[in-house]
Amino acid sequence: MLFEPRSGRLAAWGNALLAGLVSPDEAAMSIVGEDAVHRVEGMPDEAGPVGLTLALGRLRALGVTGLRVALPAPGHPLGLSGPPEFNARALEAEEAVVAVGAAVGLVPEVAEAGPAGDVHVSVTWRVLPVREAPPADVPTLSEAERELAEALREATVVLTRLDVAGSGPVAEAALSAYRARAEAGQDALAPGYPARAVRVLALAQRVDLMVSLAYESGHGGAVAASEMAARAEALRPVERVARRALVAAYNSAVEARERG
């Protein structure tokens, strides 16, 4: 339930590789994470799918100097700059990576196979042309941090009012897993990211977790359809702030380099 988009891992470790802070093998292994395999399809001058290590090298050869994250939702093209085909695919996947220095982007296509408990996940990153323009609605880290502090207060008030403030065994398990990961440092970004970005990412994940628990919880007072609609309406602005902060955190390494 901890939101760690694949586009975030690709951008973070890709940026570390482009900055010369990690090896290609370390970057590829960190991007794959718990998935079985990642391939990249549509790379220029490549007839078929290639592995992550080769793809990252090809991106650098194309002139890519950084990778940004987009986390769009209906009515909110967060991090996108066009064209329509890329935006549509990114919206369907709910995430994408946009290159800096070359007009290309990558959208993940996820396939799962196997029984419950032994699911084999493979990811194909589809390379598509993008419009070189400022990404939509991405805040600075400082703006994101201020927004998150207010969103966390709002989320707590809303969840308490709706009687879904993290109660029940499922919620407790999710919160315990989040605390364990945070204490173990597993939520840290790749090398090269400022400490503030790590802090913003962790807080954004915490807010997103609270929103997820509210949507998924079957307990509490929000049971009727009208109450479920009220819950969604109250939490939508909080969810939007969390997504904006996630994008700001993942994109901060690029922003810092562009500021010199």
Image: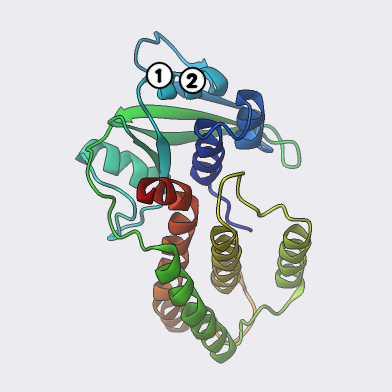
Residue 49 seen in this snapshot: yes
- Outermost bottom residue: 161
Residue density around tag 2, few if under 14, some if 14–19, many if 20 or more, within 10 Å: some
Q: Where is residue 130 in the image (x, y as percent from the top left)?
A: 26, 35
Q: Do the residues labelled 1 and 2 touch (CB within 8 Å)?
A: yes
Of the pair 58 and 235, the residue shown nearer to us: 58
Instruction: Tell me the quadrant of the picture where the N terminus can be found.
Output: bottom right
How many residues crowd around disc 1 within 10 Å: few (fewer than 14), some, or many (20 or more)? few
Q: Quadrant of residue 143?
A: bottom left
What colour scheme does the image use?
A: rainbow
Q: Residue at the location (63% across, 58% down)?
A: 2
Q: In this view, does 229 lie to the left or right of 222?
A: left
Residue 113 in sight in this render: no
Residue 19 image point, x, y percent: 51, 35
Of residues 85 and 69, the one nearer the viewer is: 69
Side of 121 relative to 74 (left or right): right
Q: Residue at horizontal 49%, vertical 20%?
A: 57
Q: Name the residue under label 2.
A: 57
Give above or below for 113 relative to 193: above
Residue found at the far front of this picture: 260
Could you tell me the amino acid type at mark 1? Ala
Query: Circle 1 sits on which residue?
Result: 61
Measured along the vertical axis of the image, is residue 169 above or below residue 89?
Answer: below
Q: What residue type is labelled 2?
A: Gly
Element at label 1: helix
| Label 1, label 2: how far apart the Cα atoms are | 6 Å
Name the residue located 53 percent from the left edge and 79 percent from the top edge. Answer: 152
